[in-house]
Image (cartoon, rainbow, N blue to C red):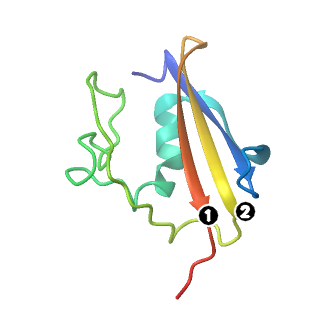
Amino acid sequence: MDDENFSGSGEAFNDAEGNGEYKQLPFYMPKQPICKMLRTYWSYANASVKYGENTDYPVHTLPCPIPKGTYYIKDVEINTDGWPLVMPRGFLKGVVSLYDKNEMVGTLAALIHITDKHS
């Protein structure tokens, strides 16, 4: 995947009550070339997704174009140390859309339950 043909965008939704009624949040990633998007937003996942531990994708180098292949990300425990201090509580859903020459070809959705940290 290269920046000339592939792009991505992202949206965030919150369900504070856990009843399935998600409301769109003002956090979003505007549609942009795929490699630029990875370089710009990778810092949020960098502490949690590690090459050789829970992925075989070379996240330590973030190559562009993205090498053809099948990759996995599994068993990730999210480290939120670098995230904003103020986050909406409840269920946060992030949806990333992937485009090939402006045609949507896939989506990735992640669901996170955000609670207060207890010491």
Rendered location of residue 59, percent (x, y): 32, 46
Q: Nearer the viewer, residue 115 or 86?
A: 115
Q: Which quadrant holds the N terminus?
A: top left
Rendered location of residue 107, percent (x, y): 54, 27
Q: Is residue 84 above or below residue 74?
A: below
Residues packed near mark 1 inside 10 Å, few (<14), some (14 to 19) or many (20 plus)? some
How many badges with numbers are in the image?
2
Looking at the image, which residue is at 36% across and 26% down?
65
Along the horizontal axis of the image, is 54 left or right of 99? left
Looking at the image, which residue is at 50% across and 72% down?
81
Q: Are marks 2 and 1 in contact (CB under 8 Å)?
A: yes
Say which element carries label 1.
Answer: strand
Say which element carries label 2.
Answer: loop
Q: Which residue is mark 1?
A: 114
Q: Is residue 31 above or below residue 52?
A: above
Q: Is residue 93 above or below residue 68?
A: below
Sooner in the amino-acid sequence: mark 2 or mark 1: 2
Q: Nearer the viewer, residue 93 or 59?
A: 93
The amino acid on which the numbered mark 2 sits, given as a three-letter code, is Pro
Q: Nearer the viewer, residue 84 or 23?
A: 23
The extreme front residue here reads 19
Looking at the image, which residue is at 75% across and 44% down?
22
Along the horizontal axis of the image, is 109 left or right of 21? left
Rendered location of residue 110, percent (x, y): 53, 43
Q: Which residue is mark 2?
A: 88
Where on the picture, by quarter, is residue 20? Answer: top right
The amino acid on which the numbered mark 1 sits, given as a three-letter code, is Ile
Q: Is residue 28 above or below residue 108?
A: below
Q: CA distance from mark 2 to mark 1?
A: 7 Å
